[in-house]
Image (cartoon, rainbow, N blue to C red):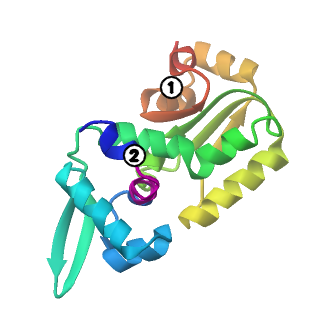
Amino acid sequence: MYLEDLIISRVRVKVVSLFLTNPGTIFHVRDIVRRVDEEINAVRRELAHLEKAGMLSKEQRANRLFYNFRKEYPLYYDLLELITKTTGLGSDFHKNKSKLGKIKFAMLSGRFARGLTHKANSDVDLLVVGTVVLPELSQIVKAEEVRRDREMNYTVMSEEEFLFRKRRRDPFVLEILGGSRVMLVGDEEDLVS
């Protein structure tokens, strides 16, 4: 459960990223090798290390070995947040921040980061607050929809509209603020205060 268990190896970072960008998915060893594009021996070595560290569990099915990231691992949600910020939509947001306009806050819902489906039509996967260049944001969202093979529900508000709705205790905004989230841009404390 030490940071050294994770950051030392490029292959380890790829393997952990694979599992945490596909939460709850069970992978066969050869599938992992194909997806991370690394040598099988390097992948096996990292899988053994991650299993020993308590991050992965393995299961034998017929003559195949399958691995799953353990949600019981003490740093699971911290790692999930870190991976969410540094891959996919989070990475695209930071790479294109200047093209997206003046963003005060950008947050992903915790349900979306965990790979869970909508529980209601009002669930928002992504909230962006600020002066946003909508065509640029739309491109980034479309890329994430393709990566995840699912539609994203996102909302864009100006800072003034967000503050007004928050002061008025708008149910939509309160529901967003009451849920779990991963901040891509901005400070969570400023968002909810």
As drawn, which residue projects farthest toward the bottom? 62
Which residue appears at 51% of the width and 16% of the height? 189
The quarter of the image holding the N terminus is top left
Check if mark 1's residue and mark 2's residue have beta carbons within 8 Å: no
Residue 126 in the image: state x and y as whole percent.
59, 42
Residue 11 within the segment the image draws in magenta: yes
- Tell me which amino acid carries mark 1: Leu
Q: Is residue 16 magenta?
A: yes
Residue range highlighted in magenta: 8-17
- Mark 2 = which residue? 8
The residue under the point 37% across, 67% down is 42
From this view, report whether residue 100 is shown above or below residue 22.
above
Query: Which of 20 and 142 lies nearest the eye of the viewer?
Result: 20
Disc 2 secondary structure class: loop
Number of numbered tags placed on the structure image: 2
Residue 89: % across, % down: 61, 49
Do we see residue 92 in this rendering?
yes
**Residue that numbered label 1 is attached to:** 174
- Determine if residue 26 is in view: no
Side of 102 where 184 appears, left or right: left
Label 1 secondary element: helix
How far apart are the alpha carbons under marks 1 and 2? 41 Å
Which residue shows up at 30% across the image and 44% down it?
5
**Viewer-side residue, 113 vs 150:** 113
